[in-house]
Amino acid sequence: MSTTTDVNLPAPNPPGAPRVSLGQRLQGLGGNARQYGIFGALVVIVLLFQVLTDGKLLLPNNVAALFQQNAYVMILAIGMVMVIVAGHIDLSVGSVVAFVGGVVAMTMRDFDLPWVVAILIGLALGALVGAWQGFWVAYVGIPAFIVTLAGMLVFRGLALVVVGETIAGLPAAFIRISKGSLPNFLGFLDNMDVVTLLIGGLAVAAIALTQVRARRALRKHDLHVEAVGLFFTKIAMVALGIGVLTVILSLSAGGTPIVLVIVGVLVVAYSFLMGRTVFGRHIYAIGGNRAAAALSGVNTRKVDFWIFVNIGLLAGVAAIVTTARAGAAIAAAGNNFELDAIAACFIGGAAVTGGIGRISGAIVGALIMGVLNMGLSILSVDPSWQMAIKGMVLLLAVAFDLLNKRRAGTQ
């Protein structure tokens, strides 16, 4: 079972014990070191495309567009990594996005419902779809691969029925969810949006406080912690990254995209869910060893059911974001979304065999996919080659994961 990598690490050396080398410390970090590698890969890819595109990748408006265009991947990846950690897969989310998006658009245009009510209907419908699929997986015992493959066909067909033609003419307030930015009520500082700067500063402070509290908790229980220098270097690097991103976004035409705030709230909420709640620990336990989890008293059926309800709900959120960005509902919406979400999870460090995966890793994986898409598009690379390159990145990420496990002797 792999709830966290820290609990299996050795305690600090007692007085008089041999000094632990830096290499041994890095090896002891386990999954944490791997997370650093994923972040490092993202930085390298960003810098590479920044050079290849002659500085166009990190133009403020391009960075804002990066988040707006790839918000759906991040949202779906949050739910997908939970499914994968539990040892399942969901192939239906793209079709669910198309179906729910069509229903949301139809309720606004044909039934003249307020856009807030339409959103609530969409979220409820997504959760209902998840409950339907979760029932077959958890209580009937049909493998998730089969259930969601059937769901991919069923809900794509329903999307074609609901959206016989493009449903346009959606309210401007609804469209702002994906295309709008937070209102600038604090003005500008040297052409920088102060609201964006404030949000970035609060994010840095929150992350630093969270890391310090986590470190204290580990030390309190005599568990292994990073060297002080490495710990503060990590915080400094994260603060630097967020600071650079904040300044760039503050110089964009609109400042902080609304959809980025939505993604940020979801990341914080689900990181807490997976790392600090009983439900999150049960997901890791089931993925690590389902039989042992059941013998320990975990209601595996109930957990499986709610995992699929959750990803159905998040598919509803992704449907709203996607429909708002397009300004209309189309039957072809959500095409290959499930593949993007799955790729983001595996690139972000989720294990194929289950039991391992983090929300932060899935988000970084989604950003890597997004940077690849944008960078290759700026370079005018043919879409066919873009797909081939992303496929190779996914293959190499999974191969890297398996090789690391074999070297560690876990397989």
Image: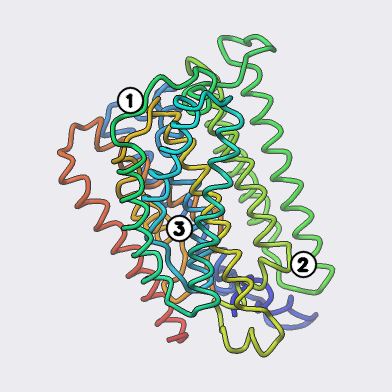
- State the residue position of label 2: 218
Which quadrant of the structure image shows residue 236? top right
Image: 10 above or below 159: below
Q: CA distance from mark 3 to mark 1?
A: 25 Å
- Going by the numbered disc 3, the residue's amino acid type is Gly
Residue 179, position as x, y percentages in the image? 47, 23
Give 223 or 137, whichever is nearer the viewer.
137
Residue topped by disc 1:
56
Q: Nearer the viewer, residue 9 or 18?
A: 9
Residue bearing mark 3: 348
Q: Residue 160: where, in percent of width, then height?
A: 30, 43
Disc 1 residue type (three-letter): Lys
Task: Specify whether residue 251 is in view.
Answer: no
Q: Label 2: few (<14), some or many (≥20) within 10 Å?
A: some
Numbered disc 3: secondary structure: loop
Q: Residues within 10 Å of mark 1 (few under 14, many from 20)?
A: some
What residue is shown at x 40% (from left), y 34% (from top)? 69
